[in-house]
Image: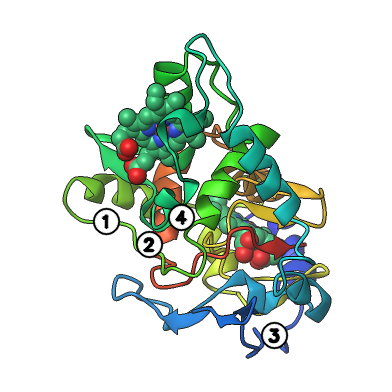
Amino acid sequence: MGMKAITFVSALVFASSAYAQDSNQLNVEGEIYASTVAAPSHMENVDTLYSGWHFRSGETQALQLDDFDNPGMVFIDQGIDLFGKVDGSEGKSCESCHENVEDFAGLRTALPRVENGELVAMEDLVNECRTERMGADAWKWSSTNMTAMTGLIGFQSRGMPMSVKIDGDATKFWEKGKELYYTRVGQLDMACSNCHEDNYGVMIRADHLSQGQINGFPTYRLKNAKLNSVHARFKGCMSNIRATPFKEGGNEFKALELYIASRGQGLAVETPSVRN
Ligand code: HEC
Ligand code: HEC
């Protein structure tokens, strides 16, 4: 570890261990969500999983409890409009083939997944339909159209437990994701685990470190007032440790997404969650 990293770690990162996740209940629209669950057996260093919601301030938490207050819901409404909008050379909308968006219930909990030997995220499924079935252009990974659509589809699984497949043909992707999670990178020479496994519950600058869970994505961030994709969040964390981020939609981030999803097995889907 270089000088810079030492200064960063001691002065800024783990300034205090006097904080921990709270014990409030995540009660969305009157339904209690699984936001604290026992960790899956593959996690050696963590006993309990906590939704990122538990690490936010009372005001930020409150925004997620009522859909009228949740600023992410505007984008879910945009997703509904897009779902019915004709686009591309075939003159079709999503609705032409998928009559009820509710039929996607459960899909969020099981992604990413392996199809024909490739790891596939929700964005890939949406773009496959756009390019192969509608004759429309692919949407950029973290564009407002894409996050509105993945938000709408994810919303159909809200409250359901995360449950990605990590055995069989998924194993090699999962292992790659795990390796990335524990590999130190960047000028600050840190791994995801250094913050989100070793130090969740403590303050970093003015922010309260969570386990870096992804059950609430795409997530509305107060910081940029829009829905944010999983990969955009990964990118931001890599930039913060002064590492060159992997490409959104690339194999590294998809493998990392699978691994991190598996570190959240059993947590309720919160799409669209609200974070700072
Ligand atoms: C021409 C018909 C057609 C159109 C238009 C279409 N899809 Fe699809 N879509 C399919 C078919 C066929 C499949 C594969 C079989 C299935 O899972 O239903 C599929 C699969 C999917 C899946 C994976 C579902 C799962 O459970 O595995 C998603 C998500 C999806 N489509 C989203 C969309 C979105 C969003 C749009 C509009 C941007 C869209 N589709 C437009 C026909 C279409
Ligand atoms: C220097 C510490 C640090 C490192 C290293 C780090 N992060 Fe983060 N990360 C943060 C902070 C601070 C936040 C915002 C507060 C929180 O939710 O923890 C955050 C938030 C997140 C979130 C959003 C959680 C939620 O509930 O919405 C995810 C996901 C995430 N990080 C993933 C990663 C991944 C993947 C890596 C490794 C590539 C990584 N982080 C590395 C500090 C870090």
Mark yes or no: residue 232 visible.
yes
The image shows residue 168, relative to residue 78, as above or below, that is: below
Q: Which residue is the site of mark 1?
A: 166
Residues under labels 3 and 2: Cα distance? 27 Å
Instruction: Give the amino acid type for the residue marked by disc 2 in the picture.
Output: Ser
Residues under labels 3 and 1: Cα distance? 33 Å
Toward which corner of the image does residue 129 lie, by quadrant? top left
**Mark 4 or 2 closer to N-term?**
4
User: In this rendering, would 110 be left or right of 242?
Assistant: left
Q: Point out the residue furthest to the left here.
A: 168
Instruction: Give the amino acid type for the residue marked by disc 3 in the picture.
Output: Ser
**Mark 1 or 4 closer to N-term?**
1
Residues under labels 4 and 2: Cα distance? 12 Å
Q: Quadrant of the C terminus?
A: bottom right
Q: Which residue is the site of mark 4?
A: 181
**Mark 3 or 1 closer to N-term?**
3
The x and y percentages for residue 14 are: 71, 74
Q: Which mark is residue 17?
A: 3
Q: Quadrant of the N terminus?
A: bottom right
Total marks in image = 4
User: In this rendering, would 172 be left or right of 63?
Assistant: left
The image shows residue 163, relative to residue 218, as above or below, that is: below
Pick whichever, 149 or 140, lies toward us. Answer: 149
Instruction: Give the amino acid type for the residue marked by disc 1 in the picture.
Output: Ile
Question: Which one is closest to the eye, mark 3 or mark 1?
Answer: 1
The x and y percentages for residue 140 are: 60, 27
The x and y percentages for residue 82 are: 63, 33
Disc 3, SS? loop
Mark yes or no: residue 230 visible.
no
| Pointer 2 with pointer 1, Cβ within 8 A | yes
